[in-house]
């Protein structure tokens, strides 16, 4: 069973969209077909705003999906990639999680993370994908995130499956206009 | 003789700094030594603000360097990477310019461009590098760029070697705090 390995930055945008678009075979590339993803790994740094983006991702998967999927948090101790050592560590972490035929999504996080992820994917013969979110959608989503920052407790609860109170806001973080591209 | 191949986005930041830091052996990585770069290729899209960033780069190299170096503009017809075809085209363009031991700098441009550049570099056994510019420096530089947008004629002239009138502003676009990292 192939899994999805995604890098995460300060915005949760892209990861859930990539997951859904893979499942539904709604992406651009060669040999397009629905892909049965049952596991999602989220690789991220420990920066405070990235921690919050992880909470939002967890809440989105918990409140807005219809299928069974396991989502795992893989936080690295670094705050950012600031040295070649950080880069190697990040790349090695992704590499160690990958099998042939997995899907690596570099949409989230800093450029150096995206590059580390793509190089690791290439080494293992995993696929490389990304999801493009139009700027107006990105702005709309950023606005909702600003609001949700004032209710971190509710976001935490949503991540544990208690979605009722903020389900609507959480699911509005998903862009219906996202476009997923399989590059390799 | 190794050359530097850089991706360019809407900000000129990084390319000149990478060039200088390589020349001076002022970077982080294994086996650090001054690298005699005589040619810089700038690969970019045809977006209007990217065109202006190219003019700024040309002016910076023309007015602020001390050594002989050729800088070449390689504009692709695409506005952005919006499909797997665009990605392939971008990657192929970079690949076709590279030799073993060249330096590929993915600091500028969109994430998908950075990934295309790094994968092309890996394939040819070129080095992969990036330059980090602190946020406060990035903001300072963006402010100067906003000012220079109102004097595009002078920027054009500076690019042709007629630096006098705006040399000071142009050379302030170079960050003394930039840090270059050799990743591979």
Image: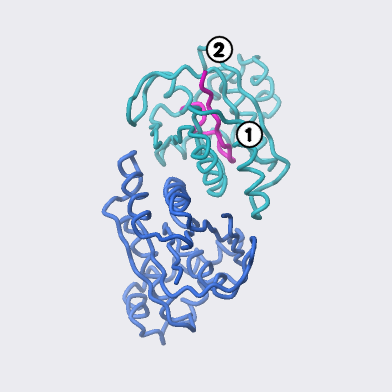
Chain colours: A blue, B cyan
The image quarter containing residue B154 is top right
Magenta run includes residue B8: yes
Q: Which residue is mark 1?
A: B96
The image quarter containing residue B146 is top right
Return the x and y of residue B177 as percentages of the image width and height: 38, 30
Q: Reply above or below: B133 against B174.
A: below
Relative horizontal placement of residue A46, taking residue B157 as reference (left or right): left
Of the numbered discs in the image, which one, if any, rests on residue A21?
none
Of the numbered discs in the image, which one, if any, rests on residue B68?
2
Relative horizontal placement of residue A38, taking residue B124 as reference (left or right): left
Tell which residue pokes out farthest to the right in this image: B77
A127 or B144: nearer the viewer: A127
Numbered disc 1: what chain? B
Q: CA distance from mark 1 to mark 2?
A: 24 Å
Segment tinted magenta in the rendering:
B1-17
B134 or B38: nearer the viewer: B38
Return the x and y of residue B94 as percentages of the image width and height: 60, 36
Quadrant showing the C terminus of chain A: bottom right
Quadrant showing the N terminus of chain A: bottom left
The residue positioned 65% from the left and 21% from the top of the image is B159
Magenta run includes residue B68: no
Q: Residues within 10 Å of mark 2 (few under 14, many from 20)?
A: few
Relative horizontal placement of residue B79, taking residue A33 as reference (left or right): right
Secondary element under disc 2, as helix, strand or loop, is: loop
The image quarter containing residue B48 is top right
Return the x and y of residue B167 as percentages of the image width and height: 56, 19
Q: Residues within 10 Å of mark 1 (few under 14, many from 20)?
A: few
Secondary element under disc 1, as helix, strand or loop, is: helix
């Amino acid at each position: 069973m192939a899994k999805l390995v995604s890098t995460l930055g300060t915005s949760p945008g892209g990861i859930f969209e990539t997951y859904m678009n893979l499942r539904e075979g709604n992406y651009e590339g060669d040999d397009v077909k629905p892909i049965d993803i049952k596991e999602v790994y989220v690789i991220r740094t420990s920066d405070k705003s990235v921690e919050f983006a992880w909470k939002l991702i967890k809440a989105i998967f918990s409140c807005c999906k219809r299928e069974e999927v396991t989502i795992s948090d893989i936080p690295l101790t670094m705050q950012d990639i600031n040295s070649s050592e950080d880069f190697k560590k990040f790349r090695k972490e992704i590499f160690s999680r990958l099998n042939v035929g997995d899907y690596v999504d570099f949409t989230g996080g800093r450029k150096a993370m995206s590059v580390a992820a793509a190089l690791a994917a290439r080494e293992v013969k995993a696929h490389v994908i990304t999801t493009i979110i139009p700027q107006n959608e990105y702005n709309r989503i950023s606005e909702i995130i600003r609001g949700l920052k004032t209710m971190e407790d509710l976001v935490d609860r949503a991540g544990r499956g208690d979605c009722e109170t903020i389900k609507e806001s959480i699911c509005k973080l998903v862009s219906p206009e996202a476009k997923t591209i399989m590059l390799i």
